[in-house]
């Protein structure tokens, strides 16, 4: 199969490697503002990986030409932080053709909806099938341009939903050779809400703000950054996330339970469960607070979840507090910026029943 991967960060590089290693022809794209990894892969002709998946895989194209990257693509992965989804959608607007499949991974709260709007596609249009996953398939870091270390490839617990949902099973079959453990979700709101990054990253970051600033992030984010009290904050946010899902008729698993299914965690609790999690061992903290753990996970994640909670009548005092504290710390208003909300995604006027059937 001819596969295009849009996004050459750690996640996109891992997706490109894994698909190519399974025998697919892969073409990799990123914007010219991010040249290093693209150039290294183009020069080498492929990607090196170590860890849970390892080896070398040839890449047919690595560059900044979106038309070259999309050439004859049957499947297109959009891989990156939440703030990359709309730019990638805008980059392919008018260039997609009937019968293609697009997968936004991870959703990062409303990824498929955001991509469709940016690409000029109607929410209910299924001429081009668009889906999203609840999380990235890997715990992964770039070790140097053209090389990734994969700490873990998920064996279970990654959900996929198409928009409209009628195409979910067909898309799961399409990607089953590379991702046989993917599971169907009831809707894109289930994949969006099951993403726990907005629950974890801001809580740990804000609780360790002084340490990050004073040491440049010289500590292990999970092993040393999640005390039992920090775990209680994560749990409080998780309870609110689960309540929003329940109001929508959607089952959202507590994050430690999902982490155990995915292979990240061994203990079903919010403290030592993260500290001792095999999937998080050795992952260092960010070097500064100006980082996606706040900008993405608050601005696109918690703001969306809090707004969805208000829309369906679920109070979110913990989320609201974290949004407010993050805004004060970063000297900006994530709420007023409204980077991703039910309004920006075009679903603010939908009833609970209509939201549950997306």
Image: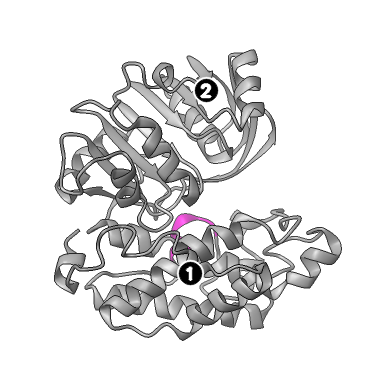
- Residue 336 is labelled as 1
Q: Nearer the viewer, residue 146 or 256?
A: 146
- Does residue 161 lie above or below 271 as drawn? above
User: Where on the picture, by quarter, is residue 175?
Assistant: top left
Quarter of the C terminus within the rendering: bottom left
Q: CA distance from mark 2 to mark 1?
A: 33 Å
Look at the image and tell me in which quarter the N terminus lies. Answer: top left
Q: Is residue 310 left or right of residue 32?
A: left
Q: Which residues are magenta?
A: 258-264
Write down the residue under mark 2.
64
Tell me where residue 5 appears, x and y as whole percent. 44, 30
Q: What residue sits 36% from the left and 45% below the top?
A: 181
Dot placed on the residue nearer the N-terminal end, 2 or 1: 2
Please say whether residue 305 is one of the residues in the magenta stretch. no
User: Residue 231, located in which quarter of the rendered image?
Assistant: bottom right
Q: Is residue 249 above or below residue 106?
A: below
Residue at x-position 34% and y-position 40%: 103
Q: Residue at x 43, y 72 (%)?
A: 254
Which of the two marks, 2 or 1, is nearer to us in this view? 1
């Amino acid at each position: 199969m001819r596969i295009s991967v849009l996004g050459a960060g750690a996640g996109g590089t891992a997706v490109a490697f894994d698909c190519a290693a399974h025998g697919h022809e892969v073409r990799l794209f990123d914007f010219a503002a991010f040249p290093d990894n693209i150039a290294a892969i183009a020069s080498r002709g492929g990607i090196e990986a170590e860890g849970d998946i390892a080896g070398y895989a040839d890449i047919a194209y690595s560059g900044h030409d979106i038309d070259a990257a999309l050439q004859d693509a049957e499947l297109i992965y959009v891989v990156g932080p939440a703030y990359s989804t709309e730019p990638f959608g805008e980059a392919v607007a008018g260039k997609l053709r009937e019968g293609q499949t697009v997968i936004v991974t991870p959703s990062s709260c409303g990824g498929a909806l955001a991509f469709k709007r940016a690409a000029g596609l109607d929410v209910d249009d299924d001429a081009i099938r668009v889906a999203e996953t609840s999380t990235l398939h890997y715990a992964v870091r770039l070790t140097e341009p053209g090389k990734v270390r994969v700490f873990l490839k998920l064996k279970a617990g990654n959900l996929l939903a198409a928009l409209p949902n009628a195409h979910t099973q067909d898309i799961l079959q399409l990607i089953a050779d590379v991702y046989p453990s993917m599971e169907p979700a009831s809707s894109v709101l289930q994949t969006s809400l099951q993403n726990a990054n907005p629950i974890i990253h801001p809580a740990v970051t804000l609780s360790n703000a002084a340490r990050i600033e004073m040491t440049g992030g010289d500590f292990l984010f999970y092993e040393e950054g999640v005390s039992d009290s920090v775990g209680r904050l994560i749990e409080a946010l998780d309870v609110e996330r689960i309540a929003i899902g329940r109001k929508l008729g959607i089952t959202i698993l507590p994050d430690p339970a999902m982490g155990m299914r995915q292979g990240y965690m061994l203990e079903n609790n919010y403290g030592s469960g993260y500290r001792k999690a095999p999937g998080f061992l050795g992952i260092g903290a960010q070097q500064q607070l100006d980082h996606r753990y706040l900008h993405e996970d608050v601005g696109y994640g918690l703001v969306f979840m809090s707004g969805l909670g208000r829309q369906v009548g679920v109070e979110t005092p913990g989320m609201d507090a974290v949004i407010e504290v993050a805004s004060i710390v970063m000297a900006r208003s994530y709420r007023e910026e409204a980077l991703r909300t039910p309004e920006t995604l075009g679903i603010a006027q939908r009833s609970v029943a209509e939201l549950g059937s997306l």
